[in-house]
Image: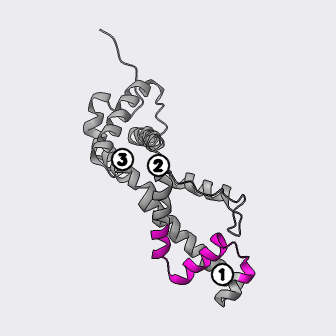
Amino acid sequence: MSSSPTLPTGTTAPEVWLETHGDSLFAFAFSRVGRREVAEDLVQETLLAGIEARSRFEGRSSERTWLIGILKRKIAGWRRRQGVVSEPDLARMVDEQFTRRGKWKTTPAAWGSDPETEEIASVLRRCLAKLPERQAEAVLMIESSRLDPEKTSKLLGVTTNHLYVMLYRARTGLRACLEQRLFRAKDR
């Protein structure tokens, strides 16, 4: 008969984790991945990882918080395997690629013609079409036509500062649309 390790105060035996924390873990996972079967699998993986790591749980947080921390890492791993970009990763990628004024730091090469690239281009066109017309024009003038901001603002009949506001709003709208149509679509 082996004795189990002493658990910190306020913790439960792993045998009751599913009953005690399962609903909260599932709700957390489902809200992040949007698919029931994936959320269930991630909760199971979390509970198994928790059992394996329970001797390292020091009780500095609640047991549920500790398990959710494990679940967050499981979700991040799943997202990486699916090719899904998280919001912090996407924000970092945008910061790495654009200057503060929204210009490419390094102009990208021309897109190829593989099916995935064509799908992305199609989604980008649909997202541009959803923008207010003047915002879409501003983005196309700056990014596609490579016009400088001063010339673009004159063509649009706005100040340069207003152009930057339009570009910010357009890029924010494009980002939301692309996240919804490209990145989240891979979750399904």
Q: Looking at the picture, how far across and down is residue 56, in whole percent? A: 48, 27
Task: Give amino acid for label 1.
Answer: Leu
Q: Nearer the viewer, residue 174 or 75?
A: 174
Pointer 2 residue? 84
Residue reaching furthest to the left: 19
Q: Looking at the picture, how far across and down is residue 16, in whole percent? A: 27, 32
Mark 1: few/some/many CA within 10 Å (<14, 14-19, 20+):
many
Pointer 1 residue? 163
Labels 3, 2: front one:
2
Q: Looking at the picture, how far across and down is residue 156, in whole percent? A: 64, 87
Q: Nearer the viewer, residue 108 or 79?
A: 108
Task: Give amino acid for label 2.
Answer: Val
Vertical placement of 70 versus 104: above or below? above
Q: Magenta segment range?
A: 125-151
Vertical placement of 132 versus 39: above or below? below
Q: Is residue 178 left or right of residue 169?
A: left
Q: Is residue 11 visible?
A: no
Pointer 3 residue? 29
Task: Give amino acid for label 3.
Answer: Ala
**Residue drawn at (28%, 43%), measured in percent from left and top?**
37
Quadrant of the image for the N terminus? top left
* SS at mark 3 in the image: helix
Mark 2: few/some/many CA within 10 Å (<14, 14-19, 20+):
many
Q: CA distance from mark 1 to mark 2?
A: 32 Å
Q: Nearer the viewer, residue 105 or 44?
A: 105
